[in-house]
Amino acid sequence: MITRRLFLAACMLCVCGSVYAQEQKGQPPQPAPADNPQLPPDQPSLPKIQSPQQIHVEEGATRGSIIKKVLPNYPKEARKNRVQGTVVLQILISKTGDVADMRVISGDELLVPAAIKAVKQWKYKPYLLKGQPIEVQTRITLNFTLH
């Protein structure tokens, strides 16, 4: 909120400075372009804000949009050594809903390859922002437990 106020204040200073400079030269002030018909003609229009190319979504919010979820196979070596634990991955979901990129945040080295192999096959419903598909960054937590 503060950043937007500072931006608006800077815009107003630019406009006022421009009007002042034109008046000093003896020229009448130029009206602001009418990009936004809702604003009165004597007020400058705000710059158009670009939509982000990518957003971050918390892990719990992405669960409901999974179309295809492949569970990891418990690695034989991890089972043999009775290794249990959690693997946390940072993933990028493409505009088409595919897992486009992945980074390991944490996890046992015996469990990580199985988690990666499974999550690469996951498919999500595309996320929409203002009706347009957008890339989404999120975290995935996979728990490996022996029964």
Image: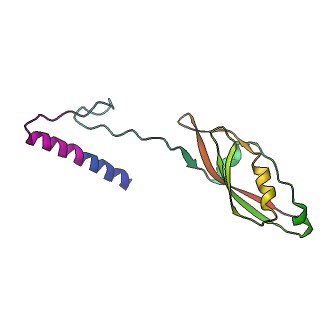
> As drawn, is 138 to the left or to the right of 39?
right
**Image quarter in which the C terminus is found:** bottom right
**Stretch of the chain drawn in magenta:** 13-30
| Residue at horizontal 53 percent and vertical 43 percent from the top | 53
Residue 24, magenta (yes or no): yes
> Is 121 in front, or is 4?
121
Residue 94, magenta (yes or no): no
Q: Name the dominant secondary structure of the magenta segment.
A: helix
> Is 5 in front, or is 87?
87
x and y percent of residue 65 in the render? Answer: 69, 43
Does residue 59 appear anywhere in the picture? yes
> As drawn, is 119 to the left or to the right of 91?
right
Looking at the picture, does residue 45 appear above or below residue 105? Answer: above
x and y percent of residue 88 in the render? Answer: 71, 60
Does residue 147 appear anywhere in the picture? no
> As drawn, is 2 to the left or to the right of 78?
left
| Residue at horizontal 64 percent and vertical 52 percent from the top | 138
Looking at the picture, does residue 90 appear above or below residue 82? Answer: above
